[in-house]
Image (cartoon, rainbow, N blue to C red):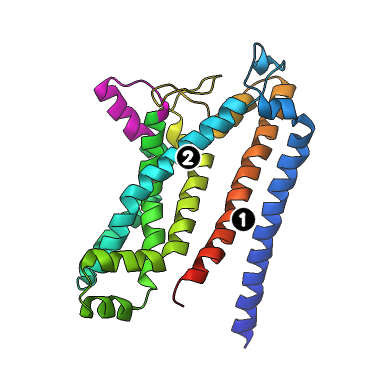
Amino acid sequence: MIEEKFFKYLMAVFTYSLIGLLFLILYEIFKKGFPALSWDMISQVPKGGFYFGKEGGILNAIVGSLYLALGASLLSILISLPVAIFISISLVKYEKWQHIIRLILDLLWGVPPIVYGAFMFSIMLSFGMKASLLAGIITIALLITPVMIRAMDEVLRNIPLGLLESSLSLGATRFETAVIFFRQALPGIATAFLLGFAKGVGDTAAVLFTVGYTDYIPRSVMEPAATLPLSIFFQLSSPIEEVKARAYAAAVVLTGIILIISVFSRYLSSRVSKNTIS
């Protein structure tokens, strides 16, 4: 009983400490960022002297982040979904191979984002590529693909094995069985997609060497692009207090985007789950 109470209180202390730390971070960001936040800052690209506290905004970074995260998430899900279904359906009789592949994915998940950035940068040098939105999309896709695959795999593992056996016993092909599994796992797949999207929006290190930076909204994937994390990074490096305040305002925008994605993820998951077999 004493050990049980001790660990119960210990878990409660850690839980409330994490919640308190989250609110402390949010409080600090919003306290410093809200005074500098304005409609002009959100709706305009940087103008001459922006990094010296003059006119302009961060619209280029907002649009660039959305382009980057959406492109990377779409590319990643095209790879992740077939791999996750293959692991869960085709390798259902080969548990050893399932464990090996999952271990590899977990290792890839744990690789620091800067390593992905450095890897992609070396590829760019080998092929003579310049920093661009396309290079950033590929880098982020490499980063979030293990996350997406493991998230989808965990959902597919929770689908009753009897569904697979029933489908195959009724004469369904592997493709038709995969479609059935896809519908059952749709809430988890949607959540995995939005999880990857949020990670793509908020990552800095992976795109530091690959996406470049520009004060303009890219018109093609071969042009460099600005992102909110990079905008925050560059503005916080300024010795001008007004520019630093703008960095916190950009952090407020970034936090708001990720919060919206998180809420929408839960809403979408609850809506889609109504169409699945429980």
- Category of crowding for the residue at label 2, using alpha-carbon neighbours closer than 10 angstroms: few (below 14), some (14–19), many (at least 20): many
Residue reaching furthest to the right: 35
Residue under the image location 75 percent in, 46 percent down: 27
122 versus 56 height, above or below: below
Numbered disc 1: secondary structure: helix
Magenta residues span 117-133
Separation of residues labelled 2 and 1 (CA atoms): 17 Å
Discs 2, 1 touching: Cβ within 8 Å: no
**Residue 99: x and y, percent?**
27, 66
Residue reaching furthest to the top: 48
Please state which amino acid type lies under the numbered disc 1: Val
Residue under the image location 39 percent in, 61 percent down: 152
**Residue 54: x and y, percent?**
72, 15
**Residue 93: x and y, percent?**
20, 73
Q: Earlier in the sequence, mark 2 or mark 1?
A: 2
Q: Nearer the viewer, residue 15 or 31?
A: 31
Residue under the image location 62 percent in, 88 percent down: 1
79 versus 167 height, above or below: above
Residue position for label 2? 69
- Residue 118 part of the magenta segment: yes
- Residue 174 part of the magenta segment: no
Q: Nearer the viewer, residue 223 or 50?
A: 223
Please state which amino acid type lies under the numbered disc 2: Ala
Residue under the image location 52 percent in, 26 percent down: 226
Numbered disc 2: secondary structure: helix
- Labelled disc at residue 263: 1
**Residue 251: x and y, percent?**
65, 37
49 versus 246 height, above or below: above
| Residue 243 in sight here | yes
Q: Nearer the viewer, residue 22 or 130?
A: 130
Q: Nearer the viewer, residue 274 or 12?
A: 274
Magenta segment, prevailing SS (helix, strand or loop)? helix
